[in-house]
Image (cartoon, grey):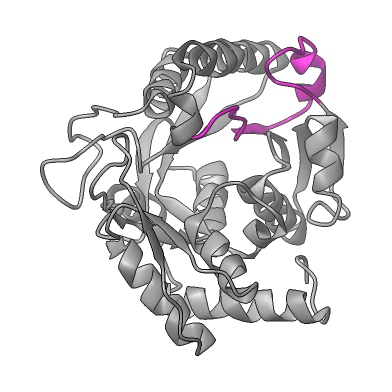
Amino acid sequence: MRVVIVGGAGFIGSALAQSLLAKGLRPLVLDTATRLAKANETLRDIATATFDFTMDRNAEALFEGADALVHLACTTNPAHSMESIAWDAESNIAPSIRLFDASVKAGVRRVVFASSGGTVYGAPQRLPVVETDPTLPLSAYGVSKLAIENYLALYSGLEGISLRVANPYGAYQLGGATIGVIARYVSEVMAGRSPEVWGDGSVVRDYIAIEDVVSAFHAALTSEVLRSGAYNIGSGVGTSINQVIDAIREASGRALDAKYLPGRTYDVPAIVLDSSRFANATGWSCRLPFGDGVGKLWQKAQALHAGTGTLVE
């Protein structure tokens, strides 16, 4: 099975590519030259090609012979998307449509799109949320993700699967990722700094280990049951920022005090995902408990800090 991963030099893409390679599949990672250079370690032994999804028009040639496409490319995050709503739309929605057009022309059978379970629902009225609950995003980022889901669903020639991923965390974020609150806090504590918290720390998120996210993408790529649709991918457990800090305190054995800053209007107060629809269809399950995942992340950070470990084992 040949899988093309667009935007694959980031956190999820690097982990997915390494996992697919280990399973004997043939991933090809497409990303900008700058991002590929930064991911030199995490994409070790992975085939890559330079591709800017906002500008390049040669996608069809790169997709030839591929069985499936994983679309991870995104130019913004929830915070930055609100600084220029027009740019968020222009640089994500139209380029995604071009990817889908190129996939059809190249004969790609399946497209798996990384949507955002943490943003597309907005502030839900009940928890955990299921896929049929209202989608009312509070950020341009969430609006774009939802729009791309809907455009993908229009392509009858593709098996379009959108994974509404919760809040992933893992070791590859320790390499300098700009998002990922858990890895950022771990890095700050390792450096002797106080974690900065937006608001009072009561914001609740559904944190899911990258190992479980990767296994969900693998299930979406290989399932003979799935054909199309949007699916939640989360742990089903809500954890507040204050609980994240407590978990890092326990894992590190260090006394640490957070620095609390004013809250942000676009932060959803609480989100927890019900992933039973995907689990029932594929047999996938979320296996790494939150406390164990944070402990594993802290151990990796220690090894990197001491120079005795690498991001890719």
Is residue 223 positioned above or below 64 on the image?
below
Asked if residue 283 shows in the view, the reply is no
Asked if residue 220 shows in the view, the reply is yes
Work out whether residue 162 or residue 296 is closer to the camera in this orientation and state it: 296
At 39% from the left and 57% from the top, the residue drawn is 197
Image x and y of residue 278, in percent: 35, 48
Quick check: 200 left or right of 16? left
Is residue 225 positioned above or below 295 on the image?
above
Residue 212 lies in the magenta stretch? no
Residue 55 lies in the magenta stretch? yes
Image x and y of residue 82, in percent: 43, 24
Work out whether residue 185 or residue 151 is closer to the camera in this orientation and state it: 185
Determine the main secondary structure of the stretch shown in magenta. Answer: loop
Work out whether residue 23 or residue 32 is closer to the camera in this orientation and state it: 32
* Residue span colored magenta: 51-77
- Give the residue at the far left of this rendering: 125
Image x and y of residue 272, in percent: 26, 53
At 52% from the left and 59% from the top, the residue drawn is 169
Is residue 93 positioned above or below 173 on the image?
above
Quick check: 69 left or right of 249? right
Quarter in which the N terminus is drawn: top right
Image x and y of residue 182, in percent: 49, 63
At 83% from the left and 34% from the top, the residue drawn is 34
Which image quadrant is residue 172 in?
bottom right
Quarter in which the C terminus is drawn: bottom right
